[in-house]
Amino acid sequence: MPANIKIIHANDFVKATPEGEFDLQESKRLLIEIASVTNPLVDHEVILDTRKTQSSMSVADLWYLAVELGNRRKAFSRKTAILCPLAQFDHPGFFALCARNRALQVRAFASFEDAIEWLTLDGPDA
């Protein structure tokens, strides 16, 4: 099935302070900005590519970002695949779980091909 897929690189919204710490407020602001840009798109799936993210996030940071995703439900109303390095799979998996708890269709993947396959199949659990 054909799909419109938007790829968002986490480097576009995951920001660090000058000391190298994760900057939650700036990251939330940029995520809101990205969501407002994607709002007008119709029938699109999203890949959130975190493979080159330099900042490490706590479990609480991931929870807060998932809350922001839920607050931007219109922009993320279709499937969202989180693409992450295999060595860090637990954190994006937790983020996906938090987002699913907000009734969003989010799954974490270590493989780009698996993410594309899931996004192009019919149904949220396909």
Image (spheres, rainbow, N blue to C red):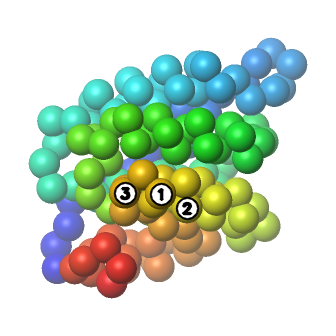
Q: Residue furthest right?
A: 19
Query: Could you tell me which secondary element the residue under label 3 belongs to?
Result: loop
Q: Residue at x 45, y 60 (%)?
A: 100
Quadrant location, the C terminus: bottom left
Residue 97's disc number: 2
Query: What is the quadrant of residue 24 in the picture?
Result: top right
Q: Residues within 10 Å of mark 2 (few under 14, many from 20)?
A: some
Mark identifier at residue 19: none
- What is the distance, in whole Å, between disc 1 and disc 3 at their CAs? 5 Å
The amino acid on which the numbered mark 1 sits, given as a three-letter code, is Asn
Disc 2 versus disc 1: nearer the observer: 1
Give yes or no for contact between labels 1 and 3 (Cβ–Cβ under 8 Å). yes
Q: Amino acid at mark 3?
A: Ala
Seen in the image, is 43 located left or right of residue 66?
left
Q: Crowdedness of circle 1 by 10 Å Cα count: few (<14), some, many (20+)?
A: some
- Residue drawn 30% across and 42% down? 73
> Where residue 68 sits in the image (x, y, percent)?
46, 35
The answer to whether the residue labelled 2 contacts the one labelled 1, judged by CB atoms less than 8 Å apart, is yes
Determine which residue is flagged by label 1.
101
